[in-house]
C-alpha cells in the first residue's frame, strides 16, 4: 500500500540534501536568472553600431554629410578611414569591420545625374542579420537627390554588395561557428569529468603515490582529448562541405592551428572545473553554466555588435568569442592565420591563467 507519509519524508530528505549542496542550489537559482538576463537584456536581433570604414574618394561637403547621416542612423559606427575599395575589402576579410562605405570620385555627378546609385556599401554578408541591418541604409537621403530620385523611379543612394554569403544561407554562417560550440561542450565536459571520475573511483589517490607530478598527470589527461577535438573539427568540416555546401576559402592548416589554440583553452578550463566539482554531475552542471553564456554572447547566434557594452565585456573573456571570429574569418572570408591571429592572444592568456589556477587548486586539494 502506498504511504503518503513515507513519500513526504523522502521528499523532505531530498529537499534538505539539495539545500546542503550549495553548488546544485546555486545552479537552480543561477541558470534561470542567467537565461532571463541574457535573452532579455544582452540578446538583440536589431543590430546597430556595426563597425565601418569609409573610403571617401569625393571629399566634398555633401559626401561628408552622407557619412555623418549614416552614422546618425546608428546602423554604423565609423572606426577607420581608408583610400581605396581594396583596403575596404581587406578590412572586411580580416574582420576589423562589417561595413565598408565607398564614395566614388564622381559622387557629385551621380547626384546630379540621378540615374545611378551615388555610393556603395560593401558588407560582410556571412551573417544575414548584419546584412539585413546594412540594407536599411540603401535609401538614405542625400541633399539635392530627392527630386531626381522620383524622376528615375526611386533610385536608391547606396548599392549594397554582399560578400562571402551572397545567397544569404544561414548554414554558411552557422556551421563554422558550430565547430567552436561543439568543442566548447565536449572539451570542457570531457576533461572536467575525466579528473572527477578518477577521484570518485579512488584512482587519484593511487596516482598520487606514484612519482607522477601534478603537471604530468594533468597533461596526460588532456592530451588524448586534443586528438579527439581535431577529429571533431574534421567531421564538422566534412559534413558542412558535403551536405550543406559551406565553402572553405582559407587554408586547412590555418583552420587546425586556430582549432588547436581553442582546444587548449577549453581543456584548461575543464581542468579548472574539475578542481571545484565533487562529482561528475556537478562537473556537468558547471560546464552547462559556462556553456550558456558562451553560446549566446560569443557572436555564434547573435551579432556581437548588437549586444550592449556590458555584455560585450563579458563576451571578450569567453574563448568561444575569439574562436568564432577566427574560424569564420578563415573559412568564410579566406583570411590567413596572420590576419586573424590577434584573436589567439586572448586564447593564450585564458589558457595560461586557467591552467595555472587549476594546478594551484589541485595541489591544495592533494595537501
Image (cartoon, helix red, strand yellow):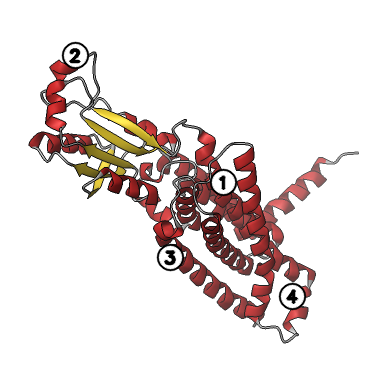
Q: How many residues crowd mark 3 within 10 Å: few (<14), some (14–19), many (20+)?
A: few
Q: Are marks 3 and 1 in contact (CB under 8 Å)?
A: no
Query: Mark 4 highlights which residue?
Result: 204
Q: Where does the C terminus fall, quadrant-wise?
A: bottom right
Quadrant assignment, res 239: top right
Element on which disc 2 rests:
helix
Mark 1 or 2, nearer chain start: 2
Residue 22 location, x and y as percent?
A: 60, 60
Rendered residue at 24%/19% (across/down): 155
Q: Are marks 2 and 3 in contact (CB under 8 Å)?
A: no
Residue 189 position (above or below residue 220): above
Element on which disc 1 rests:
helix
Query: Mark 1 highlights which residue?
Result: 178
Query: Mark 3 highlights which residue?
Result: 345
Q: How far is mark 2 from mark 4, CA to CA? A: 78 Å
Q: How far is mark 4 from mark 1, CA to CA? A: 34 Å
Element on which disc 3 rests:
helix
Residue 146 position (above or below residue 198): above
Q: How many residues crowd mark 2 within 10 Å: few (<14), some (14–19), many (20+)?
A: few
Any part of residue 33 in sight: no
Q: Where does the N terminus fall, quadrant-wise?
A: top right
Q: How far is mark 4 from mark 3, CA to CA? A: 33 Å
Amino acid at each position: 500500500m502506498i504511504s503518503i507519509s513515507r513519500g513526504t519524508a523522502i521528499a523532505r530528505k531530498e529537499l534538505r540534501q539539495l539545500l546542503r549542496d550549495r553548488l546544485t542550489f546555486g545552479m537552480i537559482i543561477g541558470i534561470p536568472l542567467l537565461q532571463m538576463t541574457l535573452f532579455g537584456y544582452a540578446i538583440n536581433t536589431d543590430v546597430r553600431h556595426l563597425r565601418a570604414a569609409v573610403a571617401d574618394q569625393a571629399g566634398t561637403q555633401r559626401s561628408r554629410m552622407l557619412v555623418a547621416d549614416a552614422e546618425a542612423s546608428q546602423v554604423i559606427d565609423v572606426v577607420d578611414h581608408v583610400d581605396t575599395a581594396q583596403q575596404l575589402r581587406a578590412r572586411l576579410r580580416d574582420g576589423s569591420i562589417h561595413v565598408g562605405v565607398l564614395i566614388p570620385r564622381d559622387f557629385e555627378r551621380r547626384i546630379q545625374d540621378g540615374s545611378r546609385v551615388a555610393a556603395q556599401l560593401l558588407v560582410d554578408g556571412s551573417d544575414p542579420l548584419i546584412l539585413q541591418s546594412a540594407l536599411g541604409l540603401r535609401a538614405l537621403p542625400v541633399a539635392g537627390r530627392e527630386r531626381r530620385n522620383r524622376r528615375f523611379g526611386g533610385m536608391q543612394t547606396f548599392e549594397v554588395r554582399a560578400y562571402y554569403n551572397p545567397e544569404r544561407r544561414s548554414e554558411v554562417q552557422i556551421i563554422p561557428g558550430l565547430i567552436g560550440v561543439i568543442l566548447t561542450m565536449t572539451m570542457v565536459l570531457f576533461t572536467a569529468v575525466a579528473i572527477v571520475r578518477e577521484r570518485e573511483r579512488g584512482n587519484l589517490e593511487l596516482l598520487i603515490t606514484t612519482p607522477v607530478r601534478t603537471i604530468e598527470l594533468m597533461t596526460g589527461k588532456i592530451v588524448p582529448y586534443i586528438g579527439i577535438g581535431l577529429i571533431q573539427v574534421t567531421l564538422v568540416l566534412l559534413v558542412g562541405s558535403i551536405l550543406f555546401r559551406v565553402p572553405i576559402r582559407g587554408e586547412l592548416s590555418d583552420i587546425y592551428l586556430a582549432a588547436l589554440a581553442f582546444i587548449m583553452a577549453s581543456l584548461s578550463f575543464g581542468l579548472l572545473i574539475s578542481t571545484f566539482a565533487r562529482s561528475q554531475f556537478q562537473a556537468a552542471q558547471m560546464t552547462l553554466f559556462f556553456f550558456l553564456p558562451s553560446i549566446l554572447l560569443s557572436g555564434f547566434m547573435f551579432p556581437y555588435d548588437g549586444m550592449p557594452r556590458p555584455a560585450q565585456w563579458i563576451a571578450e573573456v569567453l574563448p568561444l568569442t575569439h574562436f568564432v571570429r577566427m574560424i569564420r574569418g578563415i573559412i568564410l572570408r579566406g583570411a590567413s592565420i596572420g590576419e586573424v591571429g590577434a584573436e589567439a592572444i586572448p586564447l593564450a592568456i585564458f589558457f595560461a591563467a586557467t591552467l595555472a589556477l587549476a594546478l594551484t587548486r589541485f595541489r591544495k586539494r592533494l595537501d
